Image (cartoon, rainbow, N blue to C red):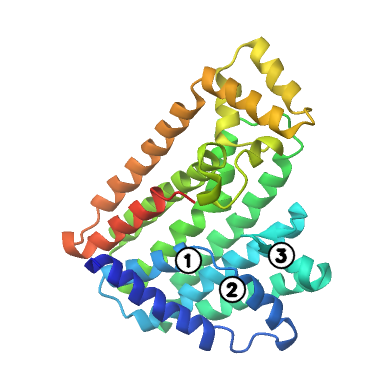
């Protein structure tokens, strides 16, 4: 095992222990079981790991960062609870969603409680910088909700511009990653310049992360990805791939895309849309966009005033996030 992976394992072990033993102290007892349900449907823990890795990179006290790390992860999972309600989703990461197990009313209230509890945990950060932590977290959490509304609005709009799509994924996905890594840097004592650079790093990494998600849904391996390949095509989701296709197509192919929106045979729909994507080089253009955004993230990371050894875990974490297969 290399040194960086050992660091990640240590940080995640500390975080998971905190999550199990302390993070839900004071949480409403009647809603604890559904909250635990979503938290135990484990994701990648990218946000708390970014926060803790950034804190350590700037020689911060990890114990002081555990509360804020819990805040970003619990907030993220709150957003998933409500997102699943909005989408009427039966499963999350292969497991029944909170509203399917505990009912709609309890799921809504659980999400509300998790949102409030996230701010409670943020307050466990160092007292002298709480105002700054709150400012960063409050801005990001508000933007996530705004991004979710854009996503809902896009469902009933036939076509979305690339500019509007990028704004939506920036708010819905990217700003929380950016805030997470910036919160860690703030707790670690980063300079003002480094706080800005690390936020930009997280923002562009988050954009690349979301477009990679679109890419994997269409071009990934179904078994590795953990979802059915082509699900976004079946649901007519406004992905970067679809937007790129519509932007580059002629009238006849554009008409064909909109006809495929109405296709009832899912396999026919997927295979025909993929054929259109191939003709329009959607795969190549999407990959180029991911590379562009990831390159910008690395530029911001390289601008940090950290020694190479201190910044290495952040670099390797970025590579893990970007190179993921699921």
- Decide if residue 280 is on the left or right side of residue 257: left
Is any atom of residue 156 visible in this view? yes
Residue 161: give x, y in percent of width and height.
60, 30
- Name the residue carrying label 1: 45
Which residue carries the number 2 mark? 40
**Residue that mark 3 sits on:** 96
Decide which of tag 2 and tag 1 comes sooner along the chain. 2
- Residue 219 is situated, as x and y percent measured from the top left of the image, at 52, 37
Spatial CA span between label 1 and label 3 = 19 Å
Residue at the image position 51 percent from the left and 66 percent from the top: 137
In the rendering, at what x and y percent does residue 123 appear? 51, 80
Q: Residue at x 58, y 62 (%)?
A: 141
* x 59%, y 16%: residue: 249
**Identity of the residue drawn at 73% across and 25% down:** 260
The answer to whether 102 is drawn above or below residue 64 in the figure is above
Tell me the SS state at disc 3.
strand
């Amino acid at each position: 095992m290399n040194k960086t992976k050992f660091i990640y394992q240590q940080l995640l072990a500390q975080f998971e222990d905190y999550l199990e033993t302390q993070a839900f102290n004071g949480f409403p007892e009647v809603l604890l079981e559904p909250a635990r349900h979503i938290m135990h449907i484990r994701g990648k823990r990218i946000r708390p790991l970014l926060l803790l890795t950034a804190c350590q990179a700037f020689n911060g006290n990890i114990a002081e960062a555990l509360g804020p790390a819990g805040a970003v992860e619990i907030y993220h999972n709150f957003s998933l609870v409500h997102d699943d309600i909005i989408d009427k989703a039966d499963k999350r990461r292969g497991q029944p969603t909170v509203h399917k197990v505990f009912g709609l009313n309890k799921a809504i209230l659980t999400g509300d409680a998790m949102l409030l509890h996230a701010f409670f945990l943020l307050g466990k950060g160092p007292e002298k910088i709480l105002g700054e932590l709150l400012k960063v977290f409050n801005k990001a959490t508000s933007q996530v909700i705004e991004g979710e509304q854009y996503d809902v609005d896009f469902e009933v709009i036939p076509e979305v511009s690339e500019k509007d799509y990028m704004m939506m994924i920036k708010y819905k996905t990217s700003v929380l990653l950016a805030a997470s890594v910036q919160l860690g840097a703030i707790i670690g004592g980063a300079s003002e310049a480094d706080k800005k650079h690390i936020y930009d790093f997280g923002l562009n990494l988050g954009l690349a992360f979301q477009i990679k998600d679109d890419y994997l849904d269409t071009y990934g391996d179904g078994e590795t990805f953990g979802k059915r390949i082509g699900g976004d095509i079946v649901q007519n989701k406004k992905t970067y791939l679809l937007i790129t296709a519509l932007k580059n197509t002629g009238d006849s192919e554009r008409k064909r895309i909109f006809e495929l929106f109405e296709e009832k045979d899912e396999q026919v729909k997927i295979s025909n849309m993929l054929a259109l994507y191939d003709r329009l080089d959607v795969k190549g253009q999407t990959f180029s966009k991911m590379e562009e955004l990831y390159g910008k993230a690395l530029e911001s990371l390289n601008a940090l005033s950290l020694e190479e050894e201190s910044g290495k875990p952040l670099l390797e974490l970025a590579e893990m996030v970007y190179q993921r297969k699921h």
